[in-house]
Image: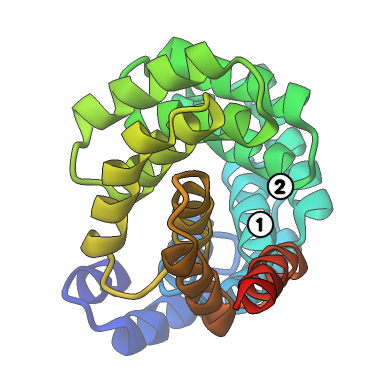
Amino acid sequence: LGSLKAGDGDSAEAEKHYRKAMDIRPEFEPPYYELAAMKLNEGEAREALEVLQQAREHFSDQFILEFYSGLAMSALRRYEPSLGFLRQAESIAEKQEPERLTGFFYFRVGSVLERLGKFKEAEVEFLKCLDRAPDDATTLNYLGYMWAEQGVKLDQAHEWIMKAHELEPESEAILDSMGWVLYQKGKPAEALPFLEKAKEKLTEPDPTILDHLADVYEALGETGKAEEAWKQSLEIEFNERVFKKWRILKDQGETKS
């Protein structure tokens, strides 16, 4: 009944049924994981962890328990414990269910490592993902953007982001990556249309895209547009690095006037 209610979008009723099943048969695993998955999908990572902790009182050495715990910790930006859970899930799967180690699994590990600044290790995991799913646009874009951010492997980054763009030409994240890798390759004029399109497609302004757009405007000598884009980025989310760029440009403009 919980699964049926969840499928109908009635999460409150679904939760009641899941919890009732957990009370009646606490040794039956599926309700714990289905409720945790529902909580994760609804952006309620703390609640998901509470459910998973209840599951730990009855079960151990379960891939899905460790994997969902890793996802929940990642959603809470607690990346070190997230990585620990994901590595434990990997260890269990290698012994019991190797088919669980999908491209999606390795993407999640890679993204956590990237957040921790462990870029070489992240690259290894993303490549494992692409071995299993070579046309995964999200991974192609993520790895290409990670390289572009570091200013390394720019030709390969460009190639893979272009492939992602061919697969999902309307994705604002991929459009942003296309613009950014071109800028990093010293091609701001080619970067501009991708970033402007990315900005146009957003339903809400994005501080990173605005920051990238400002960098491109500045490189093209359009300092007024650059200053305005950085200002808009800062209004959404303060960032010390962006603030310094905006302040320098603003001071230069005031000096000239």
Residue occupying image coordinates x 69% and y 60%: 73
The foreground one among 94 and 211 is 211
For label 1, the crowd category at 10 Å Cα-Cα, with few meaning under 14, some 14 to 19 and many 20 or more, is many
Q: Amino acid at mark 1?
A: Ser
Q: Which residue in the structure is indicated by mark 1? A: 74
In this picture, residue 80 sits left or right of residue 236? right
Q: Pick whichever, 59 or 206, lies toward us.
A: 206
Q: Looking at this view, is 236 or 138 the one in front?
A: 236
Residue nearest the viewer, comparing 117 with 105: 117
Residue 121: in sight, yes or no? yes
The answer to whether residue 104 is seen in the rendering is no
From the viewer's perspective, is the residue at label 2 or at label 1 nearer?
2
Left or right: residue 172 versus residue 237 is left
Q: Residue at x 61, y 15 (%)?
A: 153
Residue at 20 percent of width and 70 percent of height = 4
Quadrant for the N terminus in the image = bottom left
Image quadrant in which the C terminus is located: bottom right
Give the quarter of the image for residue 92.
top right
Horizontally, residue 172 falls left or right of residue 223, namely left
| Three-letter residue code for mark 2 | Arg
Which badge, 2 or 1, comes first in the chain's sequence? Answer: 1
- Quadrant location of residue 87? top right
Q: Residue at x 26, y 72 (%)?
A: 203
Q: Where does residue 50 sit, x and y in percent of width and height? A: 67, 75
Q: CA distance from mark 2 to mark 1?
A: 9 Å
Residue 118's x, y, as percent?
80, 34
Mark 2 lies on residue: 115
Label 1 near label 2: C-beta < 8 Å? yes
Q: Give percent across and percent down for residue 108.
A: 57, 40
